[in-house]
Image (cartoon, rainbow, N blue to C red):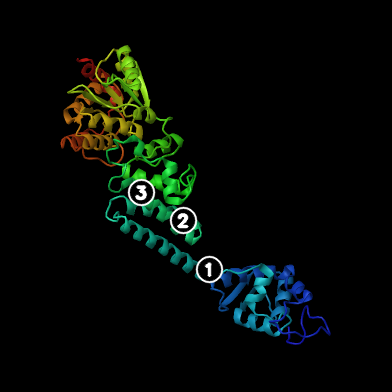
Amino acid sequence: MTSTAGPGMAAGEPEASGSERGMTARARAWLDQPALARLWDRLRDRLERNGLQVRGRLRLDGVTVAEREALALLTGRPYAGGTVSIALADLDAQLRTGAAERGLVEVVAELRGPLTDRPAARDARRAAAEATWSAADHALRSHGLADANWPRPWLEEVRRAGTLARLAPDNARRLIVQAIDIMAVLTGPGAALGAVASDVAGLPGRGELAERVTGTAHGLDDGTLLSRIVLRALARVMEVPPPQDARTRRELWEAAGVAVDRVSTTVLTLGLAPLGDEPAVRLLRDRTRAGYETHLTLRDLTRVTWRLPPGTEVFVCENPRVVEAAADRGCVRPLVCASGNPTTTALTLLDALHAAGARLTYRGDFDWPGIAIANRVIDRYAARPWRMRAADYEQHVATARDRGTPLLPLTGAPVDALWDPELTPAMTALGVAVQEESALELLLTDLLSA
């Protein structure tokens, strides 16, 4: 190819500078022939990896006769054999002085579409990510959360997931800051999470919380990225696995003090008999006298002024089976079922009972999540552990083995039981989990005592 004529250059075609025109149709058609397709494909990849810099050599192996002839015409050099090596700078010069009148980068872009400067793109992504995590760090510090034990592992988990990296930089920064703002509402001073929620009406609803932080009541709806990120943070705080379905998501929101709504989630009770003459109180006492269990919603709890007989002791269990068996046996002592990790509704009731002077007695599972839940409940209410000491655990294990009952192995990291320093070593030594229901007869004995 020469500067005045070459493949694709029409004789007598008017001259124009390369900055004023694209390639002629004939020149483009010649360059875009099948015999040169592999060259342009390989050059696109090389230039993008080079940061669009024209340097180095390109080697093509196994070239066909048609490819070798087309490459010879393109570069003005003869080739023999099945391997061709082309200096990118030489090809760039040939294209500029030939019919294309454009450099290598421009020609490849016209034939193969816009080129990406990959090193520059990587640098831009890295800078954007650093800006995102810097904004997250600033948000944590501004809310006084930087020294808490959950933010750093949570942020690292979000970073590894790569979800934010797929967003526009401004969107990624806004989203992570909103997540931290929400966590500050839920974990900061006076927040619902870990605080006494004696005023049920004051508990934040998910829609209200979302609108407060994001400007829309749907900002934390199921399926939104913000909701998923916040729930992962809450799982860290609550020391539970991330939720996997609608039920566990609802339970985690409510355990954090966020009411998804005030009617669909209930707390299971038996034997509650508050004082007073309010309609809701009378209904509850009637069910208690009849020996019926009762499911109370958040709206139900707002209708009751909780006044209790002096010295009331309320037993708290983790599994609904305990309530069912207690009702069948005619147990008379007040019983509340937390149904695993206590939801907002359960915590609201327990807060109200505790504030009314009730002494709470708690029983859960002998596994590490169960110990973590018991720590929170016992610490929050100064509750008495209910057959949950090391001697109880060892007795349960011995009884199960005597019966030939299979016991599941303990899994996960050990959790120190705050109420009994001997319990965690005993559980670690025996290495098996004991579910609450395995001690059902012992628990019923306690509940049957007047």
Q: Quadrant of the C terminus?
A: top left
For label 2, the crowd category at 10 Å Cα-Cα, with few meaning under 14, some 14 to 19 and many 20 or more, is some
> Label 1 amino acid?
Arg
The residue to which callout 1 is attached is 118
> Label 2 amino acid?
Leu
Q: CA distance from mark 2 to mark 1?
A: 19 Å
Numbered mark located on residue 164 in the image: 2
Q: Nearer the viewer, residue 273 or 81?
A: 273
**Count of numbered badges drawn on the protein:** 3
* SS under mark 3: helix
* SS under mark 1: helix
Q: Position of residue 111 (x, y in %)?
A: 69, 70
- Report the side of 35 relative to 428 (left or right): right
Find residue 287 and report its image quarter. top left
Q: CA distance from mark 3 to mark 2?
A: 18 Å
Q: Nearer the viewer, mark 2 or mark 1?
A: 2
Residue extending furthest toward the bottom: 4
* SS under mark 2: helix
Find residue 135 and report its image quarter. bottom left
Of pointers 3 and 2, the one earlier in the residue sequence? 2
- Compared with residue 119, is residue 142 higher up or lower down, i.e. above or below? above
Q: Position of residue 268 (x, y in %)?
A: 35, 24
